[in-house]
Amino acid sequence: MKGQSPLSVYAVAGQIGFAVATPLVVFIGGGSWLVDRFGWAEWVKIVFVLLGIAAMVGSVASYLRGLLRAYDDLREKEPPPSDKRDHDYYDDNYKK
């Protein structure tokens, strides 16, 4: 993130924090409320905790994968020139 303003760095850090906190609050908090509300077995809370952790890891991994694609230095290189003969419309053996 060379040359990025501090505000954009804070935005990325905030997005990662949001990706961590949201699934945990939704699954763990909501799952605990559901277990208490409907009187389910206490082991169901563990299922909600595991679902929250799995959703958190997935969302952070997805966000970081997209971030790495966006700031990948290797993608800035110019692609090699293409050969016109690679296309279907070009035919060396065509005679008029």
Image (cartoon, helix red, strand yellow):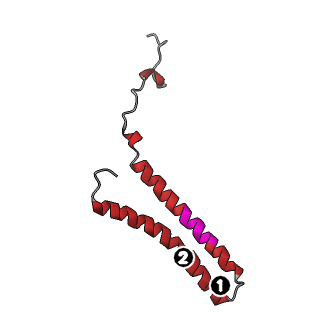
Whole-percent x, y for residue 35 in the image: 65, 84
Q: CA distance from mark 2 to mark 1?
A: 13 Å
Majority SS type along the magenta span: helix
Which region of the structure is painted magenta?
50-57
The residue at 46%/56% (across/down) is 64
User: At x 28% / y 61%, what residue is drawn?
Assistant: 6
Q: Which residue is mark 1?
A: 35
At which x and y percent is residue 24?
54, 73
Which class describes the residues within 10 Å of circle 2: few (<14), some (14-19), or many (20+)? Answer: some
Left or right of 87 on screen, residue 28? right
Residue 83 horizontal side relative to residue 29, left or right = left
- Could you tell me which quadrant the C terminus lies in? top left
Residue 68 screen position, x and y as percent? 44, 50
CB of mark 2 within 8 Å of CB of mark 1? no
Q: Secondary structure at mark 2?
A: helix
Provide the residue designation for mark 2. 26
Residue 30 in the magenta stretch? The answer is no
